[in-house]
Image: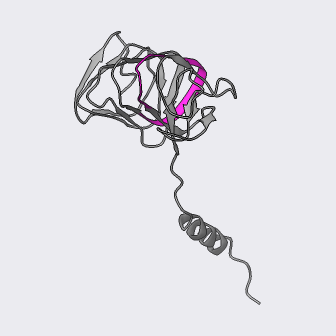
Amino acid sequence: MLPKNPLHTRSLICLAAAALPVVQAAPLYWDGTSTTVDADGGTGVWSTAAEPANWDSDALAGSDLPWTDGSEAILGGSGGVVTVSGSVSAASLAFGSPGYSISGGILTLTGTPTIDTGAHAVTISSPITAAVPIVKNGSGTLTLAGSNTFSGLFTISSGTVKVGISTPLGAA
């Protein structure tokens, strides 16, 4: 009988883990304060609490849901003021309508995050934290007005980024 080889065992575990599928965050659609089954957008509170359930599982139908940290945030419908309560994390932000601003608590970006403004002007006053590179997409203008603490690169792939304070780009 051969003695157990810890290195061999670890190698097999690593190979098995590498074969696991990559799980991507599911998109959630901003519904503001609406309780209808379509993502109307608008003003509301963004939190991880069960209520208010200001997100929908689909843009045109689906059920009202609370925010799930690590999801993709898609904000369409009518623009509005989105107030972060406490701290939330998102894999990416996409804006399909003009007139959105995000303020309040901490917004943590995870994974390989993008902020896609589309052709719209968007303001984020909430502090953004991230330990990974962030990419700004979309032809619109992103105004960063919070005291951000992200440490990864910030790449402007398209559009414009305006800064509203002295520390908008964190340590990037």
Residue 4 point in image, percent of width and height = 73, 78
- Which quarter of the image is occupied by the C terminus? top left
Q: How many marks?
A: 0
Q: Residue at x 61, y 38 (%)?
A: 63
Q: Residue furthest bottom?
A: 1
Q: Does 64 appear above or below 15? A: above
Q: Nearer the viewer, residue 98 or 94?
A: 98
For residue 100, above or below residue 116: above
The residue depicted at 74 percent of the width and 82 percent of the height is 3
Q: Nearer the viewer, residue 163 or 122?
A: 122
Whole-percent x and y of residue 94?
39, 33
Q: The magenta stretch spans which residues?
A: 75-93
> Does residue 83 appear anywhere in the picture?
no
Residue located 34% across and 10% down the image: 166
| Front one among 15 and 63 | 63
Magenta-span inclusion, residue 74: no
Q: Report the side of 116 relative to 1 (left or right).
A: left
Magenta stretch secondary structure, dominant = strand
